[in-house]
Amino acid sequence: MPLGDLGQVWVYLSASPLLWLSVTLVAYLLAFTLYHKAGDNPLLNPVAVAVALLITILVATGTPYATYFEGAQFVHFLLGPATVALAVPLYRQLGRLRRLWLPVAVAVVVGVGVAALSAITIAAVLGGSEETMLSLAPKSVTAPVAMGIAEKIGGLPSLTAVLVVATGILGAITGTRLLGWCGVHDDAIRGIAMGVASHGIGTARAFQVSPTMGAFSGLGMALSAFATALLVPWLVRLVGLGG
Amino acid sequence: MLAGITLLLCYQLAGEVLVVALGLPLPGPVLGMLLLLATLVLRASTAATVEAPAEGLLGHLSLLFVPAGVGVMVHGQRLGGEWLPIVVALVVSTLLTLLAVAWTMRAMVRLLRIEEEDSATR
């Protein structure tokens, strides 16, 4: 095929959502295979590797993010039904949850407060702008929820989405090891901590460690989405930020 | 499978509609999850319908965050100018949150003398 025809194929493909949807899936599968081959090493977090791979491709082809997202939005959309689907693992753990509801509730509220206030304080001390602080405040909850809160309190939803993903990757990489070093070995407790600190990406990692940790992480993620939606706008006003 | 996917989407839709209609401070999908959980408790047979699509979605939950993560390329300028507060806040806050949640929950479990299961057996 002459080069000119190839160029035309590119023009056609780059205007259709099919290309970037497929590339997203292929990049993730490659990243996931790499992660698996490395013995589920948390340092090779599949989200981080897939994001790096995709940005390299987008920059190399001069593709703007908006064009990419036209294809990738179909994957992004599934975050909503996936959040609803968390009811299933929760339902299976209901027996344990009935006994643990009070410790879980208190830990989630403490975690939500620590996540938002520590991020705001550290950013303030190091000279971050108010917009950045407000975008950081809901970073520990799942993307659609965090973006909604950021919009409400005066942050930048698209920046929040990035900070949410970074937080999730950090929690997935460090979580199980950090908690192990600090003497926390109970899967229910580690799961709640992973879910509250690093939402769905932490939960994905937790499911790979054990089904119990995954279910509790899903629970922590769901409850902290509630608690964050209720508490963070109030906390932000309390420390004198936002409108 | 189709019935399960439809059910998940309808619960999300119900959640979104109720949140707007009642002015609730919650995200729609989270309310949808609660409604589905209530349904599962009341009608255990629903589990068979939603199990397969739920497992499919949750099995690769981290894939769903990839498009949002790629958005980092749009924020290059801000990240360049404010990388220090952003990186330190993310790292320290995430580690602090993990520990705060785990230690609080463990302290509460001990305080209330809830029998701890051997987590290694599950």
Image: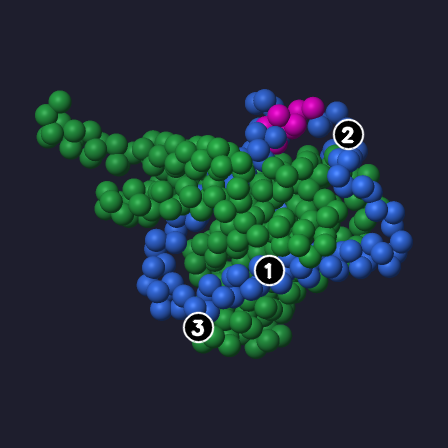
Residue at point 13% right, 27% down? A5
Tell me, what hue is chain A? Answer: green
Disc 1 marks which residue?
Answer: B95
Tell me the chain of label 3. Answer: A
Residue A103 horizontal side relative to residue A122, left or right: right
Mark 2 lies on a secondary structure that is loop
| Marks 2/3: CA–CA distance | 50 Å
Residue displayed at 16% across by 29% down? A6
- Report the span colored magenta: B48-54
Horizontal side of A95 relative to A172 (left or right) equals right
Report the Cα–Cα distance between label 3 and label 1: 22 Å
Please tell me if label 3 and label 1 are on a single chain.
no
Q: Mark 3 points at which residue?
A: A129
Colour seen for chain B: blue
Residue at image mark 2: B43
Q: Do labels 1 and 2 share a chain?
A: yes
In-front residue for pair A219/B4: A219
